[in-house]
Image (cartoon, grey):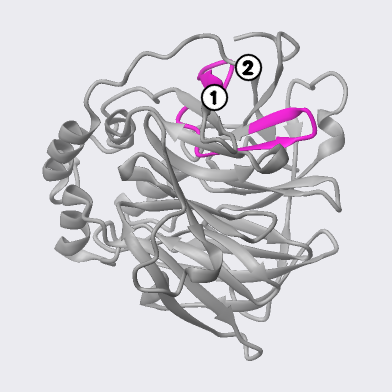
Amino acid sequence: MPVFAQLRPVAFAVLVALVMAAGAAPAHSDDVLMQCRHLPVMDGDNQPIFGIEDMAFDAVRSRLILSAYDRHKVDAAISAGEVPPQGGLYLLDLTQLRGPLPDALAVSRAVIDADEDVTLFPHGIGLLDQRLAVVNRRPGDAATSAADLLLLEAEGSGFRLVARAQGEAYCRANDVVLATDHSAFFTFDQQACGGLALWLERAVMPRRSGIASVVFQDNGGAVSRAVLGGIALANGILLEADRSSIVVAASRDGEVRWYPFSELDQPTTAPLAVVSVDGAPDNLSLGRGGDVIAAVHPSVFSLFLHMQGLAALPPSRIVLIDAQGAVTVLAEGSGNHLPGAATSALMVEDKLIVSSAWDYGLGICMPGESAGGR
């Protein structure tokens, strides 16, 4: 982990900005709806999986698709001038979650069939039927950022690469949702790709991020254009089941916003609804009846300190936003109960599954005391 003296350029400006933006996190009730248990996730070589950024529920195949890579090890390798260990997409058979929970969950690494080299550092993912869109980060020099968008098709025990979107338009891609089998919308959390502009933008965080569309082409490439801006760090994104609205997490605004799906390409598109949450929302998922489930960082400042090696991993909070805009805390905590600093959560049958880009394993939550308590 980096030490205080090794903070990246302009990090002190970021630190000051976050202090000013964070404030004191209001207290929350312990009367949460679900009780959780934090379980390790082991791959086929019995190695623990760390840093599960996002998840997708594949109901047809009764499995979860997990995107993961260990950010701590990647940063350490880059700092040492070494090749960073790549991550992967992992498949979790949901039969493991039916009945008494095991002491650890088993996953298999998805094989990617491609005619070109695909090194995986997967971030946000979105599933539609047979196809999976993946924001694939390309770690490198700390002063720059880069990502590709991959379009994959489910095939056997893995996926086949269908198309790949590359270029500066995707350098700050964060999360993605498929609209059709060949088109998607993705959030870009900043505009600057590198250098001083990248860090100044992080410090000041102007409302320069937003949503872009991408159409994957038959030749394996893609065409993209920005369709909506005015957001301070656009993060998680989802499309409502009736396709009336696209929902986005405006992390540094502390809001979840609903935009009319049919009007995204209008220059002055205003949100249909805005719900404030107590913290910074990350990835989003659909719950029952159109409810939205959000992983929320109660304190961005605490997470920043942890990322710099200056503080312990902050706790997680998972909230549900109902159709009336009411916010209910489903689960919160860390340690034995939940991964810390959760980045993703989704409902599978009667269970809430929670993951974190900054911790190991998964949190499995159930109503009442059935998960082992908090």
Q: Is residue 73 above or below residue 336?
A: below
Whole-Å distance between the Cαs marked 1 and 2?
8 Å
Q: Is residue 261 above or below residue 69?
A: below
Determine the residue positioned at 36% across, 57% down: 189
Write down the residue under mark 2: 33
Q: Is residue 241 above or below residue 116?
A: above
Determine the residue positioned at 71% across, 17% down: 367
Under mark 1, the amino acid is Thr
| Circle 1/circle 2 CB separation < 8 Å | yes
User: Magenta span covers which residues?
Assistant: 329-353
Write down the residue under mark 1: 328
Under mark 2, the amino acid is Leu
Q: Position of residue 38 (x, y in %)?
A: 62, 22
| Residue placed most toward the observer, 364 or 361 | 364
Q: Quadrant of the C terminus?
A: top right
Callout 2: helix, strand or loop? loop
| Residue placed most toward the observer, 171 or 261 | 261
Q: Is residue 203 covered in magenta?
A: no
Please indicate whether residue 32 sits to the left or right of residue 264 in the image: right
Decide if residue 218 is in sight here.
Answer: yes
Of the numbered discs in the image, which one, if any, rests on residue 285?
Answer: none
Decide if residue 86 is in sight here.
Answer: no
Which image quadrant for residue 345? top right
